[in-house]
Image: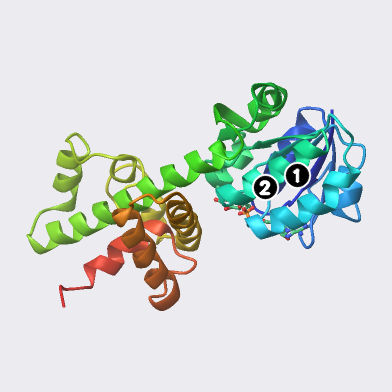
Amino acid sequence: MKIGFIGLGNMGAPMARNLVAAGHAVTGFDLAAPMPEGVAKADSALAAADGAEVVITMLPNGGILRNVAADILPAMSEGALLVDCSTVDVESARAVAEDAARRGIEVVDAPVSGGIGGAAAGTLTFMAGGSEAAFARAEPLFDIMGQKAVHCGAAGAGQSAKICNNMILGVTMIATCEAFALADKLGLDRQKMFDVVSTSSGSSWSMNTYCPAPGVGPTSPSDNDYTPGFAAELMLKDLGLSQQAAEASNADTPMGALAHDLYRRFVEDEDGRGRDFSAMLPRFETRGRG
Ligand code: NAD
């Protein structure tokens, strides 16, 4: 298949590499990043999209996605498919899909979970929004770049699922970290705390799979001095998107709002930038109530 790929950064590059390895002809464009081996370099987003059956975007945010879409949609042939794998606001995903539909182009919003490791290994999870037919067309590509794809509903549903999931993740990571810090102050051994909670009703992915306490549970970024993994600033971005969506839809999300505020302070004022999002534990560890 002839594929245009726009945005070949940390995530996009390994995803494009897997498409090339599966035998697809990939033409790429990025403002700054080098082309991965096997990807033909285009001089503009428009050139990468020109004549492609499928265009995949993997960009930083909704504003950039809207700009790139405005550039490439006029160059895409009627019947072509745009698959946006970036994490963006629900409104931008829907706006791009509407604009594309007017030109006879289908869009799937398909943000991913699994991080850079999952992108390299081809084990991402895709959560997708768009028509049944568009999802069915994108599915063989999801199978190459990932291990699971869930069709969540109409345009924007993939982004909605992503930000709801990451709102839960941000909140449970904070809860797990503050509970460890409390356990410390109560003189409870961290391994015992893990042994109990990971098999009790307080268990979660944050505790069981990505334990924020070094040396406890399976290997995680905490065992590597909190080198990401999933950086705190990316969690801040996703929590910001969930708050934006909550405001737009009049949803009451007090825990999400507090998690957003804590990660904002962590990233902006407390040296959290560049650290894994589980580094909330050393943050809580050093604090008292005051
Ligand atoms: P990145 O910053 O490494 O890559 C983004 C790339 O887009 C950069 O190479 C940049 O030069 C390029 N770009 C920006 N504007 C452009 C334009 N107008 N035209 C062409 N290229 C342009 O970011 P990333 O880590 O690859 O993340 C990409 C998306 O995936 C984000 O939306 C992010 O939230 C999401 N995501 C990231 C992770 C992760 O662990 N890194 C996990 C899940 C989802």
Of the pair 60 and 104, the residue shown nearer to us = 104
Q: Give the quarter of the figure containing the C terminus.
A: bottom left
Q: Give the quarter of the figure containing the N terminus.
A: top right
The reply to whether callout 1 and callout 2 are in contact (CB within 8 Å) is: yes
Q: Position of residue 163 (x, y in %)?
A: 47, 47
Circle 2 packing at 10 Å, graded few (<14), some (14-19), many (20+), is: some
Q: Which residue is mark 1?
A: 99
What residue lies at 20% left-to-right and 56% top-to-bottom? Answer: 180
On screen, residue 97 versus residue 103, left or right, reads left
Q: What numbered label is drawn on residue 132?
A: none
On screen, residue 278 versus residue 68, left or right, reads left
Residue 42 visible (yes or no) = yes
**Inter-mark Cα distance, 1 to 2:** 6 Å
Q: Is residue 10 above or below residue 205?
A: below
Q: Which residue is mark 2?
A: 95
Residue 11 visible (yes or no) = no
Q: Position of residue 176 (x, y in %)?
A: 25, 51
- Residue extending furthest toward the left: 186
Amino acid under disc 1 = Asp
